[in-house]
Image: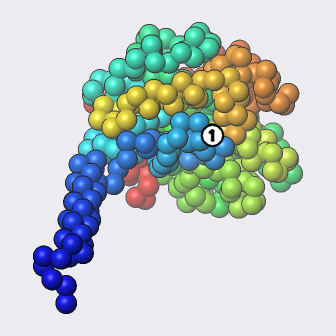
Amino acid sequence: MLNRTSPLYKCLKTIKFICSLLFYITIVTIFSTGCGDSQNQLNVFTWPGYISEEIRSGFEQEFGVKVILDTYGSNEDLLAKLKAGASGYDIIMPSDYMVSKMIQLDLITKLNHDMISNFDKISPDYLDKYFDPDNNYSIPYTFGTAGIAYDSSVITSVVDSWNVLWDKNYKNQFSMLDDPRETPGAALKLLGFSLNTKDINQLQQAKQKLIEQRELVKQYKNEAEELLISGDVVLAHCWSGDAFRAAEKRPSIKYVIPKEGSSQFIDNVCIPKAAPHVQLAHSFIDYLLRPEINAKISTFTMYGTCVPAAKEYLPKKLLEHEYIYPSKNTMDSLEWLKDLEDFTQKYSRAWDEVKAN
Ligand code: SPD
């Protein structure tokens, strides 16, 4: 038994006190920084297949931070998450019409252009668009189109119209995008209407068309790449990058923009209003705009680069490929999706009814 007055007893007591103090400081630190959330962490909420491991780990190593990726399937899913109060994200990647909606709803932060030294590397072709004139809130990440991918070793007839996705011969052999704007948009285009129509009659016709198609569809899915590569589907309503990536693995896959027209998009990098790491988010945006990094993004996603200097680092096959850079005529035939304000609910309802059938 140790004597309470002995030097050894006093020494052990001091050590015990220091240990308790350290334990207390650790607990306080963890809770005051948000239950384990670190200042050295960037939380990115993006589309699947948009940030490669190389881009993620490159930023982590250079900046000494951790990058956590989470994904969403559609602009509407992203919006719903933010509106429900998700507050931990530092970076999000909404498309054009969703940027304007988020500005209007005050969900995204004004960017500090002084912290984005590579801003002037962006081509003016992708700046000052209708959804964010002056790019106060958004930086273009990639651009692309929606269309039809098909396996030319199976489908030998000409594929040039949305009609092929209503052909009973392909029952259970194709997928459609699972998107409340793109999918009604394809039906609207087939019917000769704008994919931004606010005419309820036209929207009802498109809904009926999609209900009629329902029993033919194998799957509603936004990432058609794997389905096409595995041969699970021989046709897919999809975005251009996903078709191009599938074609890399299965060269008989081709991609076409239907003659009735389709949509084009720019996906953008934005910082949500409640982002915990705003400064780091600006550094990440600046990093993405470095030409050699941007070339890696284009090579990985197979969407177009908005940074002309990145082309120096791109493989030849990605430089002028028609899947990425369609002709001016084709681009002129394409529409941008627009925020339809209150009428958006009618699209969501129509889409829910299609899926429920
Ligand atoms: N695999 C990434 C797909 C990203 C597509 N975003 C397009 C949105 C068009 N409205």
Q: Is residue 19 above or below residue 349?
A: below
- Is 189 positioned to the left or the right of 159 in the image? left
- Is 234 positioned to the left or the right of 20 in the image? right
Relative image position of residue 52 (x, y in whole percent): 63, 44
Judge whether residue 271 can be spotted in this image.
yes
Residue sitting nearer the eye, 164 or 148: 148
Q: What colour scheme has been applied to the protein in the rendered image?
A: rainbow
Relative image position of residue 283 (x, y in whole percent): 49, 28
Q: At 78% from the left edge and 28% from the top edge, which residue is drawn?
A: 314
Q: Quadrant of the N terminus?
A: bottom left
Q: Is mark 1 within 8 Å of ligand 1?
A: no
Q: Quadrant of the C terminus?
A: bottom left
Residue carrying label 1? 58
Residue sitting nearer the eye, 181 or 11: 11
Q: At 44% from the left edge and 14% from the top edge, which residue is drawn?
A: 113
Relative image position of residue 149 (x, y in whole percent): 72, 43
Q: At 37% from the left edge and 47% from the top edge, which residue is drawn?
A: 38
Mark 1 secondary-structure assignment: helix
Amino acid at dot 1: Gly
Q: Residue furthest left?
A: 5
Residue sitting nearer the eye, 328 or 193: 328
Residue sitting nearer the eye, 90 or 32: 32
Q: At 30% from the left edge and 42% from the top edge, which residue is drawn?
A: 87
Q: Residue furthest front?
A: 6
- Is 125 positioned to the left or the right of 284 in the image? right
Judge whether residue 84 can be spotted in this image.
no
Q: Is residue 86 above or below residue 316?
A: below
- Is 136 positioned to the left or the right of 238 in the image? left
* Res. 200 image quadrant: top left
